Image (cartoon, rainbow, N blue to C red):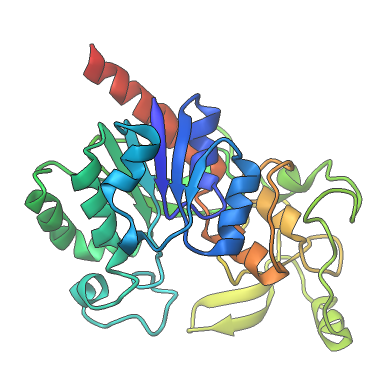
Amino acid sequence: MNVVDVFAGCGGFSRGFKEEGFELVAAIENFKPVAETYKTNFPEVEVIVKDVKEVRGFDVERICGDVDVLIGSPPCEPFTSVNLRRMKKPEDRLYKDKRGQLVLHFIRLVRELKPKVFVMENVPQILEIRNAIEREFRKIGVYRVYFNVLKAQNYGNPSKRTRVFISNVPIDEKPAKRYVKVADALRDLPPLNTIPNHEEIRISKSKLEKIAMLRWGESLVKFGGRFENWLRLHPYKLAPTVMGHSRFIHPFEDRLLTVREQARLMGFPDDHVFLGGKNVQFDMVGEAVPVPLAKAVAKEIKLKISEMEI
């Protein structure tokens, strides 16, 4: 079963499907440093480095023919409540915000490629435009759409993350058997500077003095009344949701987590390499679909496709 990944990013969604035995054949990613990261980790995949608005179904079909599974994670900034400047009216976020309109282009590709299964991932606040999304899918002949709300921590991810997976098949939430804590995730890491993306992040002396005073669960930065950053992680709890701007302080050392440590909080293996500047690397990690969650979704999709073929 082949997979095409739209808004592929650094490949968290793709890696989950690859680990479940799917064949990744094509990906669409327009930001070059991120596209290079994807190519490095998935050299067998044809990457279309273009704005999705310029990509047509036949561009993908030239690469792989018929598509079994179409996955994608359009930018969440237009919808997330963390974005304090998002448009006030929910449907404006879909129809007037240029980034929000990318959801419509994913739906267009569903129409053009006619995959057996599609899965689109986004933040929970996208449920505020559920009716509009259902209406857009009906326009292309998809009359049953499932809004599957899943928690990454229930599938072995060391950080909290609730996401909506919009698909044409149901994906059932599974209760957690055991949570993976921060200490579990960071355990057995080799010393700094010995593996890719595991270099110490330099910060000013004044900030170092301030973070030395922080206890587990305390943060240096607060914004929007309820959001925190530069938070010292509690080793025996789940990490908070990792975002592009997230910077976490090590639970036992007075320093920021490295990109590699942050990637472990999203379930990435240590051989998954991130290219570009440090901020780009952190952004890639924070914007990815956590690998354990992606793998769980892929497992469900594999089951649903096998049921379709019986």
**Residue 40 coordinates in the image, percent (x, y):** 65, 46
Q: Which image quadrant: the C terminus? A: top left
Q: Residue at x 61, y 62 (%)?
A: 33
In the rendered image, the vertical position of residue 272 relative to residue 139, given as above or below: above
Q: Which image quadrant: the N terminus? A: top left
**Residue 139 coordinates in the image, percent (x, y):** 8, 53
**Residue 82 coordinates in the image, percent (x, y):** 44, 74
In the rendered image, the vertical position of residue 141 relative to residue 175, given as above or below: below
245 relative position to 97: left or right: right
Is any atom of residue 215 visible in this view?
yes
196 relative position to 230: left or right: right
**Residue 178 coordinates in the image, percent (x, y):** 58, 35
Q: Residue at x 42, y 78 (%)?
A: 83
Q: Is 46 in front, or is 125? A: 46
Q: Is 180 in front, or is 92? A: 92
Q: Is 82 in front, or is 237? A: 82
In the rendered image, the vertical position of residue 136 relative to residue 303, given as above or below: below
In the rendered image, the vertical position of residue 182 relative to residue 234, given as above or below: above
Place residue 36 in its image quadrant: bottom right
Q: Residue furthest bottom?
A: 206
Place residue 67 in its image quadrant: top left
Is any atom of residue 293 visible in this view?
no
Number of on-image labels = 0
272 relative position to 79: left or right: right
Q: Residue furthest top?
A: 310
Q: Residue at x 46, y 27 (%)?
A: 22
Q: Residue at x 85, y 80 (%)?
A: 208
